[in-house]
């Protein structure tokens, strides 16, 4: 656009700003109407504070602006931002707003911010431009741990008391007695414990790599958190995926001029360390805990900081972890075959997420994307778990019923244990938690420890890593499997949900609505195909690799597909039991 054209457009600014303010008022009214239903684990804040509009825009491939201001091949971060700012200036001139460019997601998409209006209003305004394919709010997503809700009793730890649970890592063993939803990972370990050539990316808060369960288990990752305050590590994006802590203080939450206004007050979660340990903790070393797939490699990608993380950071992390190019970032030398996202928020899957998922699906070795359903107390599945192409995982109680905090719906592919505390009073130990690797620090990191019956871990955040670990084992047997084949095998091998007994006082799960659903009996339309069975899934993969073979597998032998369905390499290794 020439300078003269810009001045011609400039007089329209007052009209457009009036329209924007009208949209802003409407958006705020909608937000206020829905505030009573907001739940702690899925709060999105990007549209709550005026003057902080943040939107992901995608230009149409035919857009003149895109042609005139093309992104250079393999641009530096500065060059990519410069190009995006020029595009933003052109777009801003047309709509009568000063738009500030943020990071580029790909050749056609980037983030813009603006003052004086809400994110929803800005997205609505930009969506009307003829060159824009879509404009969506760049929302914050949250780690999906159990909400601070009295129905899901934690209770403070008893003084000078720790340990448990008595049942240990009940969820990794074969189902037995009351532990109906156990995933039988141990039954798969005689076939494989994981191939180090299989990479599982963990998009989360980062990791504490010094924890004994993760030491030597991690590949070089990346910190994608673009907001310096939220990152809490003093810088922007870099190649340090360690977790500095994500605590939020009361004063920060109550400061209307601060970056964390109305964020949940909480101690540091060490969430990425927890989820990583469930997938691939060091095992068979005589100490600590076991992971589902301890032979695979873990790729930490930090996307969540204080008060969560933005969609744009998460979307870039999906692309980078998969091995796609990301403007301004060096190529990931260790592309992931599995991407675990124990995070989410409310709302429908956006075009920005769909673009990333579709792009990864078109790769020669596409990753399997696994996401937690959400902890909204039986409401609709959140984003990104509700995106097509994602394996969404709901949470189960030990008895195989839906655990109260888990969300549900037709988007769920399969269910796995989420941990639950049964019939306990304050101060008593949780009976069926998920044991994880974590850290003692309430703000900055201190000593490496484990969660237990008194410092318990529960949530669909811990259901998803079980599935990601299972997928890692399946790909270790046959790395040629596609995401669609993986999903089909997981569902075919799943164990049926237990049927409710006669006169049961636990209801059947129903389609999500505005009402909470606590414990309920799962169906295939609400909780997926059934309960995860790792051993059964790996067995199906093994039989597909050797459909006509009659080779007796020696316990402790690792079967690795080499990409040729007719050629399989058997590599012996010792399993101490």
Image (cartoon, helix red, strand yellow):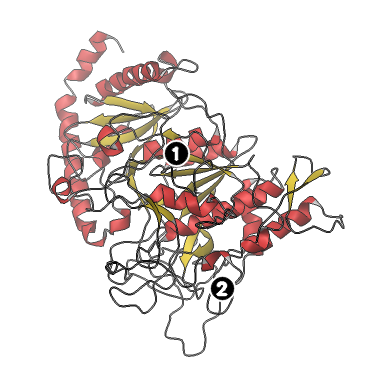
**Percent of width and height locating residue 22:** 17, 41
Q: The C terminus lies in which quarter of the figure? A: bottom right
Give the image quarter of residue 87.
top left
Q: Looking at the picture, tell me which residue is in the foreground, 220 or 118.
A: 220
Direction from residue 250 to residue 425 in the image, left or right = right
Answer whether residue 380 is visible to the viewer in this image.
Answer: yes
Q: How far across and down, in percent of the image, does residue 148 sit?
A: 28, 63
Q: Is residue 287 above or below residue 135?
A: below
The residue to which callout 2 is attached is 497
Q: Which residue is mark 1?
A: 301
Disc sitting over residue 564 in the figure:
none
Answer with mark 1 or mark 2, whichever residue precedes in sequence: 1
Q: Is residue 368 above or below residue 149?
A: above
Q: Which residue appears at 51% of the width and 58% of the height?
A: 289
Residue 174: give x, y in percent of width and height. Answer: 61, 69
Q: Around disc 2, counting alpha carbons within 10 Å, would you say few (fewer than 14), some (14 to 19), or many (20 or more)?
A: many
Mark 2, secondary structure of its residue: loop
Residue at 28% x, 52% y is 43
């Amino acid at each position: 656009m020439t300078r003269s054209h810009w001045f011609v457009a400039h007089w329209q600014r007052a009209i457009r700003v009036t329209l924007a303010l009208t949209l802003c008022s409407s958006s705020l009214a909608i937000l206020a109407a829905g505030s009573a239903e907001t739940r702690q684990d899925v709060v999105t804040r990007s549209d709550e504070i005026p003057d902080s509009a943040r939107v992901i825009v995608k230009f149409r491939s035919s857009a003149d602006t895109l042609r005139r201001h093309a992104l250079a091949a393999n641009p530096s971060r500065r060059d990519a931002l410069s190009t995006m700012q020029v595009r933003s200036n052109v777009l801003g001139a047309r709509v009568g707003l000063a738009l500030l460019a943020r990071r580029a997601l790909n050749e056609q998409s980037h983030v813009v911010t603006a003052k004086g209006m809400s994110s929803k209003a800005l997205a609505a305004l930009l969506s009307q431009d003829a060159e824009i394919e879509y404009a969506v709010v760049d929302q914050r997503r949250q780690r999906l741990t159990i909400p601070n809700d009295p129905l899901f009793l934690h209770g403070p730890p008893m003084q000078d008391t720790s340990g448990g649970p008595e049942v240990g890592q009940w969820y990794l063993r074969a189902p037995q007695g009351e532990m109906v939803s156990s995933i039988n990972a141990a039954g798969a370990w005689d076939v494989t414990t994981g191939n180090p050539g299989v990479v599982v990316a963990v998009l989360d808060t980062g990791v504490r790599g010094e924890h004994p369960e993760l030491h030597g288990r991690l590949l070089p990752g990346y910190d994608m958190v673009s907001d310096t305050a939220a990152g809490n590590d003093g810088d922007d994006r870099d190649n340090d995926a360690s977790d500095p802590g994500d605590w939020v203080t009361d004063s920060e939450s109550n400061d209307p001029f601060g970056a964390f206004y109305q964020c949940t007050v909480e101690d540091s979660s060490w969430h990425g360390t927890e989820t990583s340990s469930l997938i691939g903790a060091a095992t068979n070393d005589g100490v600590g805990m076991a992971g589902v797939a301890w032979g695979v490699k873990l790729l930490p990608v930090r996307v969540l900081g204080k008060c969560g993380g933005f969609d744009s950071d998460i979307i870039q992390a999906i692309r980078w972890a998969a091995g796609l190019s990301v403007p301004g970032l060096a190529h990931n030398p260790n592309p992931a075959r599995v991407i675990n996202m124990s995070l989410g928020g409310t709302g429908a899957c956006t075009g920005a997420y769909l673009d990333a998922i579709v792009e990864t699906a078109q790769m020669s070795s596409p990753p399997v994307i696994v996401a937690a359903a959400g902890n909204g107390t039986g409401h609709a599945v959140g984003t990104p778990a509700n995106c097509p192409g994602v394996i969404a995982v709901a949470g189960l109680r030990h008895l195989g019923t839906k655990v109260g905090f888990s969300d549900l719906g037709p988007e769920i592919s399969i269910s796995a244990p989420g941990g639950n505390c049964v019939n306990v009073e304050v101060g008593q130990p949780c009976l069926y938690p998920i044991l994880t690797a974590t850290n003692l620090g309430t703000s900055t990191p201190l000593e490496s420890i484990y969660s237990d019956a008194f410092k318990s871990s529960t949530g669909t955040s811990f259901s998803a890593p079980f599935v990601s670990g299972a997928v890692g084992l399946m790909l270790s047997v046959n790395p040629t499997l596609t995401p669609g084949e993986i999903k089909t095998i997981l569902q075919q091998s799943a164990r049926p949900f237990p049927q409710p007994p006669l006169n049961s006082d636990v209801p059947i799960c129903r389609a999500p609505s505005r009402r909470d659903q606590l414990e309920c009996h799962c169906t295939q339309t609400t909780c997926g195909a059934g309960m995860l069975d790792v051993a059964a899934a790996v067995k199906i993969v093994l039989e597909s690799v050797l459909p006509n073979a009659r080779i007796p597998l020696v316990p402790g032998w690792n079967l690795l597909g080499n990409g040729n369905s007719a050629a399989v390499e058997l590599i012996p290794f010792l399993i101490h039991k």
